[in-house]
Amino acid sequence: MNECVLVADDDSNITDVCRRYLEREGYHVVTAKDGLEAIELWHSQTPHLIVLDLMMPHKNGWEVCNEIRQTEDVPIVMLTARGEEQDRLMGLTMGRMII
């Protein structure tokens, strides 16, 4: 399996854990520490899946998701500590699932 997964989160503990689990399952994983780096890696790596934190510096997860959705429909899993109803509704409206 050579599918690429982009994990974008400003918490290195989270990206490390996600990376280790995904690599153990055979995925190629690239990580970003902020929204700008996530956009750069999305352009250069063309991931098959994006795991995206909502609260990142430079560009938040909503902005990254919106920019990607302008041209592509790659699956995006939003990973966040925020669980308010408004955040869930916004994620579903954008066609994404929040966990």
Image (tube, rainbow, N blue to C red):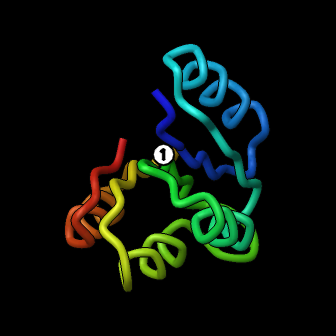
Question: Would you identify the image quadrant in which residue 66 lies?
Answer: bottom left
Decide if residue 69 is on the left or right side of residue 9: left
Q: Residue furthest front?
A: 2
Q: In the shown orientation, is residue 50 left or right of residue 9? A: left
In the rendered image, residue 20, in percent from the top left (x then y), is placed at: 66, 21
Q: Of helix, strand and loop, which one carries label 1?
A: strand
- The residue to which callout 1 is attached is 79
Q: Position of residue 8 (x, y in %)?
A: 63, 52
The amino acid marked with disc number 1 is Leu
Nearest the eye: 78 or 88: 78
* Location of the N terminus (image quadrant): top left
Q: Residue 30 in the image: x percent, y percent?
A: 67, 45
Q: Relative to 23, is 67 above or below?
A: below
Q: Residue at x 65, y 66 (%)?
A: 44
Query: Left of 22 or right of it: where is 87?
Result: left
At 75% across and 31% down in the image, what residue appears? 13
Estimate how packed mark 1 is, as few (under 14), some (14 to 19) or many (20 or more) residues with alpha carbons within 10 Å. many
Rendered residue at 47%/39% (across/down): 3
- In this view, which residue lies farthest toward the bottom? 70
Q: Is residue 58 above or below residue 24?
A: below
- Residue 61, compared with residue 25, is above or below; it is below
x and y percentages locating residue 92 in the rendered image: 22, 62
> Which of the two residues, 86 or 74, is positioned nearer the viewer here?
74
Residue reaching furthest to the top: 24
